[in-house]
Each structure stands twice: as C-alpha cells, then as structure tokens.
Image (cartoon, helix red, strand yellow):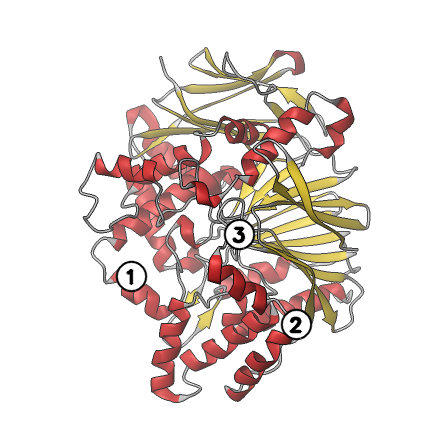
Amino acid sequence: MTALVLGPHLRHVSAHTATIWVETDGPCEVRVTSAEHGVDARSRTFTVHGHHYALVDADGLAAGARIPYEVTLDGVTVWPERQTRFPPSLIRTLDTAGTLRISFGSCRRSPGTRAEYGLDALSTFAHRLATHDHDPRQALDWPDVLLMVGDQVYADELGDQMRTYIRGRRDPDQEPADELADFEEYTHLYKLAWREDPAVRWLLSTVPTFTIFDDHDIRDDWNTSYTWRQQMWSKPWWRGRIIAGIGSYWVYQHLGNLSPEERATDPVFAAVRAASEKGGDGSAVLDEFAELADKEPAGTRWSYAHDWGGTRLIVVDSRCSRLLTEDRRGMLDDEEFRWLDEQCQGGMDHLLIASSLPFLLPQAIHHAESWNEALADGAWGRRGARLGEKIRQAADLEHWAAFEQSFRDVADDIVAVARGERGPAPASVSFLSGDIHYSYLARVTQPETESMVTQIVCSPLRNPLVGRFRLANRIAARRSAGAPFRLLAKMARVPKPPLRWRMSDGPWFDNAIATVELTGRDCTVRWQTPATETTLSEMGRANVC
C-alpha cells in the first residue's frame, strides 16, 4: 500500500481554487475529496531522484469556503490520520471582500535541534489556532495566508537528527562536512522540518502557505558576491550541492507558490511530468534546470505576485536572481528588476513587497553595508577592495544596502507608487522581511508621499540571537549609532540614500510570528512570541496606516 511521506500541504489558493501538495513513497493517483462540498480532484505523482510528488488542484470552490477534505492514494484514505488531537484539515479559499490576514516569519531551526533555540513560534501558533478552532468566537483570528520568507530549512547548520542520518549513509567528515551534500539529504531535512512536529504538519495542511528561499536554504551568504561564487564553484562538492538545493526547493517550495494556470504553462514542470510517465524519473530534467538556474539566473524567475482583492503581494527572490559579474553587482538581474518594476503599480489599497532580506535596515547597518560595497568596489584602492571583500563575507554585509544601485532603483519605484505617479496611491506600501533575527517596524519619513511606506520585519521563528550578537544589533538599532557609519560611507563617496526612515517599533529579539491585517484602507501589524508551547503573548502591535 502506498503511504503518505509528507503533507498534505495547502499551498496556493485563490477565491475559487486550492492546491494540495504531497509526497508519497511510491507512484500513485492522489485524490483530494470532500463529499459534503462536492470536491473531487486528482493527479498522478511525478518522480525525481526516486521520490514521488503530486500537486492536486481543486477548482470551482466558493469564496471564503472552509472545506474539510480527505486525501486518498490509489483509493486508500491516508489523511486525516485516524488518531490525532488536531481539528480536521480544511481547504480555506480567500474571501477578497473582507479582511485579509497574512501571518509571516523566517529563520526556523527544525525540531530536534538544540533547546537553546527556544520555543518554536510556528508550532505554538499552530497550537493556538487548533485550540481556537473549537471556539466559534475566535474564528476571525485565523490567518488567510502563511508567508515563509526564508530559511525554512538550514542546509549548512545541522541538528543531531540530521547528523545521525548522514552518518548512516556517508563519512560525516567527507566534504561537505556538517552540511548537506545531495538531493536525498535535502528530502530528509524537509521531513524533519515539516513532519516531526504534529502541530506544524497540521498547520501546513490547513493554512494556505507561500514561501521564498534565503541563504540557509542553500548555504550561509549564498551569492554574497562574484568572488564568493568563484570560491564556491572551485570546491569539488559544490556543483552537486547547488543542484540539489535548487532542485529540492523547486519541488518542496516553489511549485506550490504558483497558481494552477502558471504551473500548467511551466515547461520544466511539463518536462519532469513527461519524464516520470510509465515509471520514469525526471531527475535529469530537474538537475539540468537547477544548474542552469544558478549559472544563468536571468533565465529563471522564482519571484511571483498575487492580487487578493485590494492587496497586491509581490514576493521577490533576492538570492538566486542576483547579478554578480566581475564588473557589475545587483541584488536583482536586469530581467528580474524589469519584472519587479512592472509589478510596482498603484490602484491597490495596499502594496506588499516580501523580500527575505530587509529593504530598510537600522541606519548604522545600512551605512556600514553601503560603505563596505564601495570599499570592495575599489573606492579606497586595490588593498581596500580585498579588505572590503573579506569584511563583506565575514560580517554578512550583503543586504539591499550592499547593492547600492539596486536599493536606489527600488526606492525610486516605491516613491513613484506612493506619490500616485503610477495610478492612485495605495494607503500603504510595506516590505515584509526576515533574516536578521530580530523584529521591528521602520517608517519612511522623507520624501513626502501619499502612501505610508514601511518596513515590517519578523525574525526568527526559532533561532534567536544570543550574547554579543544580540548586544551589537541592539546598539546598531539606536538612532545615534547611524552617524559615524554615514560619515564612513560619505568618505567612500557613497551618496545619501534616496529615503530617510526611522525605527518606530522594536527591536524585539525573541522568537516570533507576525500578522499583517488589512481591512479596506487600514493596515495593522502585531508580533507574537511563544509564552508556552501552546500559548502566544503579544510582543508588539502597530497601526501601519
């Protein structure tokens, strides 16, 4: 009998469609049904590297529906599980006429890793929802979407369970030591992240989830610079690692971000399915695609955008699509920036731009990174350039501020939208980000705009800063800390940023999950942190507009 390995995950949803993702232990027909609501959708699995996956699209659903569903494999029911303390999994379609709630976070160390990482905000969030699900008075508290903005898995900082698994299949001292090596190891890491905790597994089955990768999904400081890429590709094990990392991301995360229409026109998805027919395997197709996606990033788009009523969510890939050559450096390659430029339009109530890396950092860090980029680009000569590159890699100075021209280009787009130069100005333009292991709200103060422009950061779900790292970032977040670093950047001939901003709320350093609530032209955000394994306490709340 075919068994369910991972999932079901409720992924892309709209007002009338929903996609269910699963991994199984053999090829089969996957069927998603709800007799009460007339749902009967099915799809055959496809195969890569001996693993079997399916995405099942349900169509013709009612807006705002809450539909209990079952999953069968070749006619045998495998979900819901017979013994569970959690409520039934539901297909939850969007109701674009009402309030939209987007919960988000990043940087989650998997279950089984050290206790020092603290309580898992994602797990606690799941327990809270499961408890409230039994209370009709709490129904409106549910998120419509869960957005995971990076570091869903840590491929380069392993826990004990992952190390034990690796020791069972290869010499753990063999390069890459204490890191993942291939697709098979990635599959096990995803199981640890999304199956080991029953609460998280249930949450992913019943809340629509969208994702984007960050560096640890592949490796710390992934695509920091052209020099970094040259150094990594000189390592004999890197080719296998980057192919496995990108290929597994495509399977486990990217496909579920796409609408059924977008997936239907994806040539890679079609080729993998075709190669999987009659017992075949799409590994060669996927591996070739993954290698090309790394070497020629302009040919692949991981970013995506969805309109939900009066809200447009743009999710930007700020890792794989970087422009890194000997003479040019960009957070986005030219094709990716053209796409983002096209998406940044007015006429919406709210424009949300999700980037794993914060666009607006604390002032001290922003100026330090812009100075470092100028140094690495030769502002103080060749010796300074070599020193700048060493500092860039050692201190992780590779956020938007470290790609000065990209920062300015996106800032110009945002100001144009917020001033009503691209259609009626939204009430809010907000960046949603993670990565830096603390949370805050920053507000743009200049130039004047019709829209409120903000940066909302929520990080980590489970991986807090400790000791001197927390202290250093707490100091950097002070307004007075920015001046000396701005002077340093000015000495390297870095122009003033086109925006001015201040941190109005935070920073908070605890594990947390944030929820952005959008009703008409109003926008609020709250951050919650685990008080116990099953309860959350409010860490902060702010009116965005």
Position of residue 68 measured from the top left corner of the image (x, y, whole percent): 62, 18
Position of residue 229 measured from the top left corner of the image (x, y, whole percent): 33, 64
Give the labeled residue for mark 1: 232
Which residue type carries mark 1? Met
Which residue is at the front of the view, 68 or 298? 68
User: Where 109 sits versus 295, above or below?
Assistant: above
Q: Residues within 10 Å of mark 2 (few under 14, many from 20)?
A: few
On screen, residue 187 versus residue 39, left or right, reads left
Q: Earlier in the sequence, mark 3 or mark 1?
A: 1
Q: CA distance from mark 3 to mark 1?
A: 24 Å
Identify the residue shown where x is 27% and y is 46%: 181
Q: Earlier in the sequence, mark 3 or mark 2?
A: 3
Give the labeled residue for mark 3: 303
Indicate the quadrant where residue 442 lies.
bottom right
Which residue is at the front of the view, 375 or 131? 131
Position of residue 391 measured from the top left corner of the image (x, y, whole percent): 39, 73
| Circle count | 3
On screen, residue 66 versus residue 532, left or right, reads right
Identify the residue shown where x is 56% and y is 46%: 511
Q: CA distance from mark 3 to mark 2?
A: 33 Å
Q: In which quadrant of the rendered image does the N terminus lie? A: top left
User: Where 385 sits versus 300, above or below?
Assistant: below
Give the labeled residue for mark 2: 479
On screen, residue 300 versus residue 363, left or right, reads left
Q: Residues within 10 Å of mark 1 (few under 14, many from 20)?
A: some
On screen, residue 294 versus residue 459, left or right, reads left
* Mark 1 or 2, closer to the camera: 2
- Determine whether the residue tagged by mark 1 lies in a helix, strand or loop: helix
